[in-house]
Image: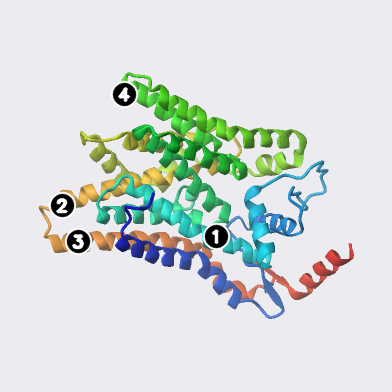
Amino acid sequence: MFLNITREEWKFLGAIWAIVAAVVFLPFVVGYFLTPDGSIFLFKPILRNSADYASYFSKIEQAKQGIYFFKDFFTSEPQPSGVVNPFYLLIGLFAKFFNLSNAAAFHAASFLLIPVFLITAYRFVSFFFEEISKRKVGFIFLIFGSGITMWGSWAFSLTILINPPHFIASLTLLMLIFMFSMYFFENHQLRYGFLAGLCAFLLISFHPYNIYTIVFVPLAFLVTEYITDRKIHFNHILHYISVLIFCMPPLLYYMWVFNNVAIYYQTLFLQNGTYTPPPWIVLADFSLLLVLAGFGVRFILGQKDRKKRHIFLMVWMASQFFLVYLPISTQARLFQGLGVPITIFAAYGFLFLRDSFAQKIPGKTLFTFSNVALVLLMWFSISRLFFIDAYYTNMGKNADSDVYITQDSENAMIWIRQNT
């Protein structure tokens, strides 16, 4: 799968990995060294789903203790059964094997998943750009492209990478599902259909929110394909059905859980309201990238050799904008993945504009300008995240902040654990 990635490209990937790792982990390093006297740093952020971290650490701890059906210990509601989460079960077993703390195992999972995500993302981009220089541009857009504000932040890669590791794993698997599906739509090799289905099974087993994207985006593509080709591609329909069949076992399990463990459904959906802001806010947030993406779509539509992959990408971008307004309480979670087609088309648009100015601007000047633009894209995306994490500079002044507990509090918790 990665045979056509050159040594030069691997070095480029290594450089991007170093930048991303610094963005993800530097705030925790700073937070640790700013720990007030008599306090303990919890290695969790304030604004990035901070309250959820206790739940993730709890699952890891339960797995370390040999409890594989996790219960929610942050409620007094009855729980007739625990719930399997294979992702955090694996992290817990990993922590037990290497004798790691919950926080260390949690962040180690992110550290290990980031290169997997980057390689997958680069392979995804390589599917659309054959020239190495264009691949690099597309990859920079995919990793560092972002909105202006944080309203639709779950759509974009860098925001996903600074979040808990299951977000990284879920976006990686979502890209693999659609990449293998596009391979199948163009080559009709059964192994790609199987791999897409396997990735769908793994994804839904720990992140069922993505089922809407898996169901509706390929369905929209099949409808679009029928309209444009005036032909029913039965093998494509069979592929779609097979992917849904792979999704069924974890979906049926979650349906059983929702019916029998009421608190799980309440926590996952009723108390986890993440609503999408009005369309004008989303469009304004994505406006810069959407303008470039518009030029990219225009460029692709003007090509006679456009392929199924390009049509699929257009359908993905258009249909997921509608998915984020489904009448459910977890709308904003459906932003995940939307940034992939937007940023790839934005890269097409950027390259289209660069080539359009090639005859008007001297080559060296144009080269410098385009590189400066890419650096500014990276700088804006990174600085935007560091602005959110700016509270780390003042954490040392507040021992009662959400990321610290006092030594006395920890001692009290240890006593309770050992004596109850």
User: In the image, what residue type sits under mark 3?
Assistant: Phe
User: Mark 4 touching mark 1, by CB under 8 A?
Assistant: no
- Depth check: give the residue in front, 109 or 36: 109
Q: CA distance from mark 1 to mark 2?
A: 41 Å
Q: Earlier in the sequence, mark 3 or mark 1?
A: 1
Residue 119's quadrant in the figure? bottom left
Residue identified by numbered label 3: 367
User: Mark 1 touching mark 2, by CB under 8 A?
Assistant: no
- Depth check: give the residue in front, 215 or 328: 215
**Count of all numbered marks drawn on residues in the image:** 4
| Residue 100 in view here | no
Judged left or right of residue 354, residue 73 is right
Q: Earlier in the sequence, mark 2 or mark 4?
A: 4
Q: Residues within 10 Å of mark 1 (few under 14, many from 20)?
A: many
Q: Residue at x 47, y 61 (%)?
A: 385
Q: Which mark is residue 110?
A: 1
Residue identified by numbered label 2: 357
User: Mark 4 touching mark 3, by CB under 8 A?
Assistant: no
Disc 4 versus disc 3: nearer the observer: 4
Q: Residues within 10 Å of mark 4 (few under 14, many from 20)?
A: few
Q: Residue at x 78, y 53 (%)?
A: 73
Q: Which mark is residue 91?
A: none
Please identify the quadrant where the C terminus is shown: bottom right
| Residue 113 in view here | yes
